[in-house]
Image (tube, helix red, strand yellow):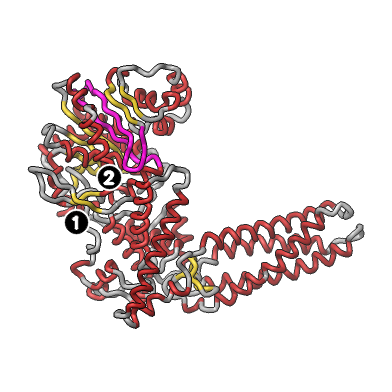
Amino acid sequence: MPGLVVFGRRWAIGSDDFVLPGAFELFVRWIGILALYTVHKGQFNCPGGGLLHSYLLVLLILLASIICALSALVYVSMQGTISNPGPRKSLPKLLYTRLLLYLPEFIWAVVGAVWVTDSSVHCEKTVINVIIGTVIASWVIIIFTIIGVVIVFDPLGGKKTFYLTDSVNRNLESSQSGQLLYNVKNTATRVWEKRIRLLCCCIVQDDDHRVAFTSIAELFRAYFSDTDLVPSDIAAGLTLLHQEQDKMESCPKEPEEVLCHSPSSLVTDDLDIELENAAHYMLFAAAAYGWPYYIYTNPFTALCKLNGDCCGTRPTDTDITGSDRRNFHFGSILRITGLQYRDFIHISFHNKIYEIPFFVALDHKKEAIVVAVRGTLSFEDILTDLSADCEDLTLEDVLENGFVHKGITQAANYIYRKLINDGILNQAFSIAPEYKLVIVGHSLGGGTASILAIMLRNSFPTLRCYAFSPPGGLLSKSLADYTKHFIVSVIVGKDLVARLSMPNMEDLKRRIVRIVANCNRPKYQILLRGCWYEVFGGDPDNFPTELDGRNQDALTQPLLAEESLMVHRSPSYNALEDESHLNSPPQYPHLYLPGKIIHIVEESSSRRLCSSDMKYTARWSNETVFSSILISPKMITDHMPDVVLKALNSLSQEHGSCISC
């Protein structure tokens, strides 16, 4: 950090990123040179032995040269800190030297391969095996080096792009500079668009996809355009943030903070009722995932059970659209929910961008018509998630204006049209007119269910919605407050998705920049200590930083080290200069979780992922608790539907046992 500049362009690797791969290559090279030295001391009284002796001698000299170059490269890469690359300024020259040594190594690897395949050579088997091992090791290292170069290649690292900031800063009024900035932005957007197209190459692409690709590319370009961070810098920043966060959590809480979480008896009773309902309806939200979820939660028996169901005929009175080969999806939904064929009104497995699967069923236990919306399970769903622009949602007699997540709103519009225009809800209420309407979903399905509930609220005043782990950047403040009357969101632990919003991502970026810019340890030490901490636990490392001893006023100003990490002063970075906007990036509107929020946390458990001793506690929370992304090994697992269902079942059973006592 900043990105290494060699061959006149920037690369997505820092000058301090050669320590660990260089040390590993040194280890391999030393093993090779010791093996060759042992063989070289032997006799070569075999046909072609003289040629072999010369080959090994040159190979020993070549390996010794490579080891010297690698040792110097690793030593220099260990110097300095992430934000202080000065002690590593000689690294590009050492890197050029190491790359030049690849040419004779490649030639000698070819010669070795030719010699090994020569049938006229009849030397000892040990000698031949050592030569084969050396040749294979050389080819493997060369191939991995080529792969590494491809990975760290930055399409935007050209000299014109890299030095754009200087030309713009010299003359902000220059039309030439403005045109250059415009061209670079367009180039960056095209690069991100090509990357997204490559990732989604296996899906059929139409006009909706192309619009989504461009929108998502603009989002990524804007987010990554103002920092000079390489991937390893982000990894180091995340592990530092995680340890800092754990140190703060271990501090004793203030008495006022403890008292504010002590709910009244009435609120506790309301929470228990909602937890029981949530545990029941989470089955429907999980069932919407179909056979992938069923096999994931029953890996040993699911296929046998589903194969027994696949030969069954579909009921003629159930409206099923979309592909469901061998009846696996429908069979899984039946087994997860415990419903009968006749209880399903409509099932849609149709999946495109902005069009996600859902089903409508009769829940006789709770006397409800349940609309269950599936969460993210395909590339099309990911594109819907990433279409994170804001758009207005205008509702008659409710609100004049409200901002919502664009992609999720379009998915909700699709289901709304199906439910109303195709008469699905009319059909359901004609069968069970006394039942209430309940909309549920997990993740993307939870966000879609929430916006769908807002759209249907006027027509169905008694409607209820349960959103499990919905995306954080979903509704504007006015809409979020409006939904507190009929939507309940359930969040488990440090769920990442529930905290995902553009302001939170901007905040995370600034926190990473600040903590890596002020850490006084080399990057390799941070990463090694971080890996140990994540795998084996222990106490968080107290890394010394330049922040120690600085007063609070000084912390509101950009640090010199931070300035070196910013390519240009974006609106998000300028916010650092204004204390009133320190936690509120201005270019993205704040969007919040829907409805009333139930936050479930682990009361006691091991910090490790494999722990089975878990006890949960739940409390009502508010949207401000989720205004910052928390770094944890469980930030992904806490979002999974089986973990949410397990937590809800645990709390529901605990409440039931308390009542029986």
The residues colored magenta run 350-378
Residue 399 inside the magenta-drawn segment:
no
Label 1: few (<14), some or many (≥20) within 10 Å?
A: few
Mark 1: which amino acid?
A: Glu
What kind of element bears circle 2? helix
Tell me if I can see residue 606 in this picture. no
Q: Position of residue 298 (x, y in %)?
A: 43, 29
The C terminus - image quarter: top left
As displayed, is residue 657 above or below residue 531? above
Residue 374 inside the magenta-drawn segment:
yes
Q: Position of residue 332 (x, y in %)?
A: 38, 26
Q: Quadrant of residue 249?
A: bottom left
Give the label on residue 408, or none.
2
Q: CA distance from mark 1 to mark 2?
A: 39 Å
Q: Position of residue 41 (x, y in %)?
A: 83, 64
Q: Quadrant of residue 58?
A: bottom right
Residue at 33% across, 30% down = 348
Q: Position of residue 2 (x, y in %)?
A: 44, 71
Identify residue for label 1. Answer: 254
Tell me if I can see residue 34 in this picture. yes
Residue at 59% across, 75% down = 94
Q: Nearer the viewer, residue 105 or 274?
A: 105
Residue at 48% across, 64% down = 155
Q: Nearer the viewer, residue 276 or 114?
A: 114
